[in-house]
């Protein structure tokens, strides 16, 4: 199903007035086959698409294509451009204080967290101690800096940093972590850095030896400097409490795919964090079908319930970016209800 991809690419090529663009590929890379197929199809039907959009605008008295979107979607798009740029410090390479000093030498001014961020300023986040906040417009400047290029400072949305920070109170020596769900290599690396403080390991499942995702994860972990990862080919549902590799796992971080309905920029989250791209069409209308929501919830319950079956696990952290109760407190209650009663172990946190 390429409809979601086609919708995103149609908006892009229309915004560029169907001008041919140079492929944005790295060294040794080629265009993804699906992207090439959709792009060729859009250009082939260019005249019909432009005429159809024009008729639709006239029929509904719309000034521009953006007006096709529901009001709430447009408001989210406008808010997106005002969001702060978040970045976390790779403490394997430097400390937060050292990075703050380096930023000041590059013309940035450190301000109080309660200050409105505008211009070349930054502040420390009040929730996550290793996260720094910048004005949205500062991202382009930051991306040219050595701090970013050498992976000392990592730009990433704050929702994932909050999940990682929630792990901190649960960590101690001999407390390995298992990450479950869909997430980026940057999120995994952030978890690994937290675990390294106590010389703990991080396990990631569902990575066959020949998978592209496994290769990408290994490459990113190497660049960032993480050496405490154990990559498993088995799916989470196939792992059991008797697995000898998981005997020290006491914390499970569950990051399942969700509707991303609570985010001002859900598209970036879905693309960057391995989300469900079939949601793009739903999100363009600011609604998610009951069928789609239920399929996501069922997977969330499955992962949460399975995490609760490991007797040595003392903490399960569940992260969602959804406004729906079904993906928040209700899914947690249903998972706890489904979990087997653990009579001889400590309660979960």
Image (tube, rainbow, N blue to C red):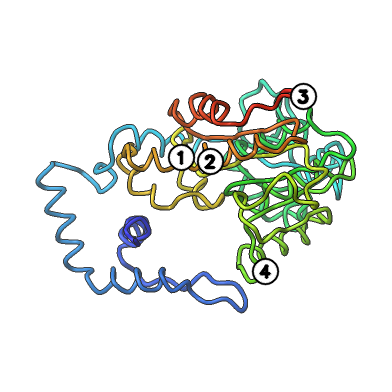
Q: Earlier in the sequence, mark 3 or mark 4?
A: 4
Q: Quadrant of residue 75?
A: top left
Which residue reaches farthest top? 114
Taking depth in this image into account, of 24 and 221 the one nearest to the observer is 221
Q: Earlier in the sequence, mark 3 or mark 1?
A: 1
Closer to viewer: mark 3 or mark 1: 3
> Which residue is denoted by mark 4 in the rendering?
209
Labels 2 and 1 touching (C-beta < 8 A): yes
Which residue is found at the position 52% from the left and 45% from the top?
269
Q: Earlier in the sequence, mark 2 or mark 3?
A: 2
From the top left corner, tell me how far across and down residue 323 is, in percent.
45, 28
Spatial CA distance of label 2 from label 3 is 22 Å
Closer to viewer: mark 2 or mark 4: 2
Spatial CA distance of label 3 from label 1 is 27 Å
Spatial CA distance of label 2 from label 1 is 6 Å
Q: Decide: few, some or many residues near mark 1? Use Cα within 10 Å; few <14, some 14-19, many ≥20.
A: some
Q: Secondary structure at mark 3?
A: loop
Q: Is residue 201 above or below residue 86?
A: below
Q: Earlier in the sequence, mark 1 or mark 4?
A: 4
Which residue is found at the position 57% from the left and 41% from the top?
303
Taking depth in this image into account, of 302 and 154 the one nearest to the observer is 302
> Which residue is denoted by mark 2 in the rendering?
302
């Amino acid at each position: 199903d390429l409809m979601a991809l086609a919708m995103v690419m149609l908006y892009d090529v229309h915004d560029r007035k169907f001008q041919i663009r140079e492929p944005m590929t790295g060294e040794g890379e080629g265009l993804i086959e699906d992207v090439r197929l959709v792009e060729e199809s859009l250009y082939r039907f260019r005249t019909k698409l432009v005429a159809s959009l024009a008729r639709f605008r006239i029929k509904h008295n719309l000034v521009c294509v953006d007006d096709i979107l529901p009001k709430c979607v447009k408001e989210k798009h406008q808010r997106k451009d005002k969001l702060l740029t978040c970045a976390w410090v790779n403490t394997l390479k430097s400390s937060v204080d050292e990075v703050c000093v380096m930023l000041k030498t590059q013309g940035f001014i450190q301000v109080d967290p309660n200050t409105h961020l505008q211009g070349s300023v930054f502040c420390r986040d009040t929730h996550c101690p290793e996260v720094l906040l910048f004005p949205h417009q500062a991202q382009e400047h930051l991306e040219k800096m050595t701090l970013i290029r050498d992976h000392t400072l990592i730009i990433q949305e704050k929702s994932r940093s909050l999940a990682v920070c929630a792990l901190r109170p649960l960590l101690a020596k001999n407390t390995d972590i298992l990450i479950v769900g869909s997430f980026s290599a940057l999120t995994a690396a952030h978890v690994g850095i937290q675990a390294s403080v106590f010389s703990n390991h991080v396990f990631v499942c569902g990575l066959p030896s020949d998978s592209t995702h496994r290769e990408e994860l290994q490459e990113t972990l190497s660049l960032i400097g993480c050496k405490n990862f154990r990559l498993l080919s088995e799916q989470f549902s196939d792992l059991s409490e008797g697995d000898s590799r998981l005997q020290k796992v006491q914390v499970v971080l569950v990051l399942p795919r969700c509707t991303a309905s609570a985010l001002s920029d859900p598209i970036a989250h879905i693309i960057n964090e391995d989300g469900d791209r079939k949601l793009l069409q739903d999100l363009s209308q600011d609604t998610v079908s009951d069928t789609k929501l239920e399929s996501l919830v069922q997977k969330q319950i499955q992962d949460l319930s399975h995490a609760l079956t490991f007797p040595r696990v003392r903490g399960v952290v569940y992260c969602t970016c959804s406004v729906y109760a079904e993906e928040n407190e209700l899914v947690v209650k249903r998972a706890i209800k489904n979990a087997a009663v653990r009579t001889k172990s400590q309660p979960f946190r």
